[in-house]
């Protein structure tokens, strides 16, 4: 790999980094400020934060537009920049309106809903199209490794952003929060431009793929490639089960540590760093070596199996009252989640073609985000219900962990039944000719291969 190509790949990492940074500002910093410093009801804040997730099915239509209707002759770069701009405006508008929510009352609530809607749509447009750009830009086994490795800077943005933003907002003032919001938004847009400009392949294949995608309407594309295709439906459910089974604990580990093990606020806060460290290590190892050496099915299976065992271990740690065991298991949970995430990402990107990359990445992205929303909602609801009925936090949280494990078992069963060679999307690409395949998946015997050739 020459130096210029290496620099191009390196600057692409700027986009997932700012994606993580903006995400932690919205769901971490602004979330806390609205509830604690601004005294906005938590239910209302929850509604604001749910808006981006509720708009996740829009990713499918946005991806279709990116495939079929280039802007300025390009399918990916303009859509990513447009999404980044819309997301940045949403961040600034949401922060400004939140600060003035007391004086604007009902008008502020409506404005905040619109702002979070803009942030969500922009995020979906930019991130989905970036993933399609990866599918277009890389070929062969480099595709699965690339989409995994580009998640590492996102986690760095999340962890680093949480540290830096906390320091920038100390001491807290309304003016300082607005200044930080403008800074985050500006940095996100600038780094996005640096990351994606001149990255999109400008080839006749891409032009031909765009014309082919435009021949079929969005609804016919969805009907034929997803609704009527058993493999696509199985894969959609697999992605949702994997995410729900992994993400339902996302908002539960810290309360579990506090209520069951008596950990302090500072001790439970550090759990995120343990989990994040494990996830970053396993993502980097998977993208750099494991997937290339063993294929992504084994990596995915190991990650899902590890998480099943970890959930059982966390219940045991709670029963034994072992804080040290719990900390170690959270680190292992991060490792397992990273492996499962890497394997799932590799499977997702292999279920794409040059013609339909944006649309298909939108479908799997929608499944992922809906799974995250469902996981958070059902996890919290079960805990609240069982605690109210029994008063036993170990039983309440342990029940959620058992259900998560069962969902991951279901995901493993579904994985064994998925054969993407039989999917309509890959069949369409094969029918159109090898020159339109995103990464030669059909030439290599289909997606989700067992061997090390991936």
Image (cartoon, grey):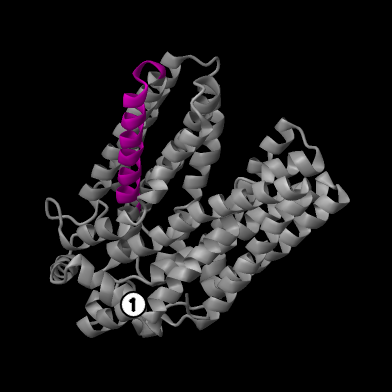
Residue on which disc 1 sits? 440
Please tell me whether residue 22 is drawn above or below residue 247 in the rendered image: above
Look at the image and tell me whether residue 249 can be seen.
no
Image-quadrant location for residue 375: bottom right
Image-quadrant location for residue 191: top left
Disc 1, SS: loop
Q: Residue at x 44, y 39 (%)?
A: 47
Q: Residue at x 41, y 74 (%)?
A: 233
Overall secondary structure of the magenta section: helix
Q: Which part of the image, by quadrant, shows the N terminus? A: bottom left
Compare residues 39 and 232 and report the one nearer the observer.
Answer: 39
**Residue extending furthest front?**
389
Look at the image and tell me whether residue 5 can be seen.
yes
Compare residues 101 and 313 and report the one nearer the observer.
Answer: 101
* Residues in magenta, as a range: 102-127
Compare residues 229 and 25 and report the one nearer the observer.
Answer: 229
């Amino acid at each position: 790999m020459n130096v210029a190509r290496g620099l191009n790949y390196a600057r692409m990492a700027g986009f997932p980094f700012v994606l993580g940074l903006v995400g932690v500002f919205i769901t971490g910093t602004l979330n806390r400020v609205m509830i604690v410093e601004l005294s906005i009801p938590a239910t209302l804040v929850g509604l604001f934060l749910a808006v981006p997730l509720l708009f996740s099915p829009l990713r499918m239509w946005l991806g279709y537009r990116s495939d079929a209707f280039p802007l300025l002759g390009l399918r990916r770069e303009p859509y990513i920049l447009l999404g980044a701009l819309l997301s940045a405006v949403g961040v600034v508008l949401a922060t400004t309106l939140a600060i003035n929510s007391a004086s604007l009352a009902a008008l502020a609530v409506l404005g905040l809903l619109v702002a979070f809607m803009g942030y969500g749509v922009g995020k979906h447009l930019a991130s989905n199209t970036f993933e399609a750009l990866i599918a277009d830009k890389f070929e062969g086994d480099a595709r699965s490794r690339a989409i995994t490795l580009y998640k590492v800077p996102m986690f760095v943005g999340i962890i680093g952003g949480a540290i830096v933003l906390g320091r920038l907002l100390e001491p807290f003032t309304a003016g300082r929060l607005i200044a930080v919001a403008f800074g985050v938004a500006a940095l996100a847009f600038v780094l996005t431009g640096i990351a994606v400009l001149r990255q999109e392949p400008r080839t006749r294949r891409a032009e031909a793929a765009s014309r082919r995608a435009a021949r079929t309407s969005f609804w016919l594309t969805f009907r034929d490639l997803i609704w009527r295709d058993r493999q696509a439906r199985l894969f959609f459910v697999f992605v949702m089960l994997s995410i729900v089974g992994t993400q339902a604990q996302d908002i539960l580990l810290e309360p579990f540590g506090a209520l069951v093990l008596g950990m302090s606020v500072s001790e439970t806060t550090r759990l995120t760093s343990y989990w994040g460290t494990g996830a970053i290590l396993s993502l980097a190892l998977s993208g750099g070596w494991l997937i290339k050496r063993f294929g992504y099915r084994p990596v995915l299976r190991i990650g899902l199996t590890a998480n099943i065992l970890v959930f059982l271990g966390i219940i045991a740690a709670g029963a034994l009252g072992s804080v040290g065991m719990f900390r170690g298991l959270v680190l292992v949970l991060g490792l397992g989640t990273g492996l499962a995430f890497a394997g799932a990402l590799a499977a997702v990107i292999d279920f794409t073609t040059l013609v339909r990359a944006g649309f298909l990445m939108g479908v799997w992205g929608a499944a992922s985000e809906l799974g995250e929303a469902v996981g958070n909602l059902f996890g919290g609801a079960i805990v609240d219900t069982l605690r109210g009925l029994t008063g036993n936090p170990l039983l309440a949280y342990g029940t959620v962990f058992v259900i998560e494990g069962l969902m991951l078992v279901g995901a493993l069963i579904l994985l064994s039944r998925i054969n993407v060679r039989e999917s309509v999307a890959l069949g369409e690409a094969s029918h159109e000719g090898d020159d339109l395949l995103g990464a030669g998946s059909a030439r290599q015997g289909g997606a989700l291969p067992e061997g090390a050739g991936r």
